[in-house]
Amino acid sequence: DGSKKEKKSSTPMTNEQILDNLTMVAGKRGENRRVNQDDVVMMEEMANVVVKDDSGSSHGGSRGVGAGLSSGDDRDRRSMSKKGEEGDELWEKELVLAVLSAEGYTLEGRDISVEERDRIDKISFMEHPVGNSASILRFSGRDFSKVLELYVSAKEQDEKIKLSSSATKRDYPSQQQKSSQKKKPLGLPVIIVPNAMTSPITMINAKEFFSQAKFIPRDIQMKKGVRKMTSLTIKRRTASHYGGTEVEYEIIDNPLTKIHRKHWDRVVAVVAQGAEWQFKGWPISKPVDIFTKTYGFYVGMEGAPIPRDVQTWSVKRCVVSRDRRGLDSITYASFWNGLDQFMAVHKPEYMNLT
């Protein structure tokens, strides 16, 4: 094994191996650059030159260095020739290091004219090391005050637009605010219920349902001796996010005799019976128009089919049960939540919001 290693270590490096090992060549000012074709040609020429040392001995083949080397190169050559006696491999490595030395790229070997010196000084003066954006901004001769002026001007313009917009909002209220400010309630808001014995909610049990969240069937009310009234009033406090104010409502089932045509705006909700004849003779008789200008609500008995007309109307649909009173509060809350939302948008004057 030892003899093999000795044989391997004594084998001299070829020109191709030397060129393959050259990955970087020292550039100007000691900087590194990639090997180009000129470097390869130079190395091949230098490898085929015979060099003599001070004692007159010579080295041939790939061990020579060109005669164009400087005095500093001669010293390196003599030193490397002495080291060459210690081994071919070490000598060739020294030769490579000598070629890669930055000394061969300096201007110290010849005189530099004044014109060339001026050119070099100008080039050096124009060089700027670029590290990041901050170093670029620090270049001498560059003035960025104009950029700052443009930025400040744009910010001032944005502030003026914001101030103008806020002033416009204060001075000119929206169309909805204008209309609500002009409107005044013509009386109590009105809830219309069906005038039909087949409807779950009528005047005979409307008070208990709308004020107490309790559905009492019509036949039970009749047995109790409760008599039908032509109109009744209830009071209810709206939700906190709608002002939490107390609102009084009037409940009727015959709007033609209770409301003048000029006061039809008082109607805020209509409980649908399920047939279009309910609206016969009304100032607004088409269901599409009625449930656009009022809050539509339909109450059916649990398990009963929903009328076909109701399915095409814009109404909230709920059910009540004869014996399951748990559904009463659900239907009650559904009605009042929907009505509060409708009035807050379309009839806020009747909620004491103006």
Image (spheres, rainbow, N blue to C red):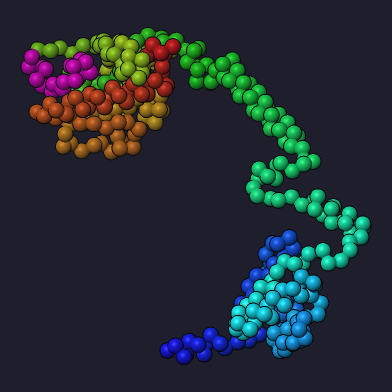
**Near-viewer residue (14 or 190):** 14
Residue 266 placement (x, y as % from top left): 38, 14
**Near-viewer residue (72 or 226):** 72
Residue 156 placement (x, y as % from top left): 67, 26
Residue 98 placement (x, y as % from top left): 69, 73
On the rendered image, what quadrant is the C terminus found in? top left
Q: Is residue 219 left or right of residue 141?
A: left
Instruction: Quadrant for residue 95, please give it.
Output: bottom right
Compared with 227, 280 (above or below) is below
Q: Main secondary structure of the magenta part?
A: helix
**Which residue is pictured at 70% across the width and 62% down the height?**
30
Instruction: Quadrant for residue 341, please give it.
Output: top left
Q: In this view, does 33 lie to the left or right of 114?
A: left
How many marks the image carries: the answer is: 0
**Near-viewer residue (63 or 176):** 63
**Near-viewer residue (204 or 82):** 82
**Which residue is pictured at 10% across the width and 21% down the height?**
219
Compared with 290, 37 (above or below) is below
Report if residue 209 lies within the magenta region. yes
Q: Can residue 278 be seen in this view?
A: no
Compared with 139, 222 (above or below) is above
Residue 40 placement (x, y as % from top left): 71, 79
**Which residue is pictured at 71% across the width and 41% down the height?**
138
Instruction: Quadrant for residue 271, please give it.
Output: top left
Q: In this view, does 112 lie to the left or right of 106?
A: right
Q: In this view, does 263 lie to the left or right of 143?
A: left
Q: Is residue 130 visible?
A: yes
Report if residue 32 lies within the magenta region. no
Question: What residue span does the magenta drawing correspond to?
Answer: 207-224
